[in-house]
Image: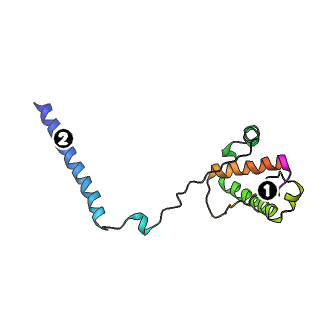
Amino acid sequence: MRLFGYLIITIVFAGILSCSGMKKAGSSARQEPGIQLNETKPEPDSTIYEITIIDPGFESWFIKNRKQAWYHTKESLAIKNWQYVSAWNQKVLSGSFQMQNRDNPFIETIDYRPEIDYGLDLNYKLFYYFKYIEATWGKIL
């Protein structure tokens, strides 16, 4: 009988605690009706960027020549990629490299903006694509 009494007291106590927690959550929600957090303060850029490299020789070269992703920081890769993209776009816009070799990879400009956080994975793969291009076509920078 004593065990049954303790069980009932425990259940009642747990019920009181759970109800008081609900009141706190409900009261904070009532303070500002109709205002959502994403309306007053925009959330960070939640766009996920990905890169697709179609060059048939890249994947095998990438597996053989890459270093682990933790070897680089996202910031250092972003700086290097910005330098590579600038040199790449300059080659595309000049057109002189295209006249020398029509099979070259410098066909389209790359829209890479340093103020956008593309993430480690994209910067990592893009950096090694530039390294692959340098290994097959010569220096970009």
Q: Secondary structure at mark 2?
A: helix
* Amino acid type of the residue tagged 1 in the rendering: Phe
Give the residues in magenta. Answer: 135-141
Looking at the image, residue 11 sits to the left or right of residue 81; the answer is left
Q: Position of residue 141 (x, y in %)?
A: 83, 58
Q: Is residue 82 left or right of residue 103?
A: left
Compute the Cα span from label 2 to label 1.
Answer: 72 Å
- The quarter of the rendered structure image containing the N terminus is top left
Q: Nearer the viewer, mark 2 or mark 1?
A: 1
Q: Amino acid at mark 2?
A: Ile
Task: Identify the mark at residue 18; answer none if there is no mark.
Answer: none
As drawn, the residue found furthest toward the left would be 1
The reply to whether dot 2 and dot 1 touch (C-beta < 8 Å) is: no
Q: Residue at x 52, y 57 (%)?
A: 46
* Residue position for label 2: 11
* Disc 1 secondary structure class: loop
Q: Is residue 5 above or below residue 93?
A: above
Q: Position of residue 104 (x, y in %)?
A: 82, 52
- 141 or 71, which is in the foreground? 141
Rendering coords of residue 72 (x, y %): 69, 49
- Which residue in the protein does label 1 denote? 106
Q: Is residue 21 magenta?
A: no
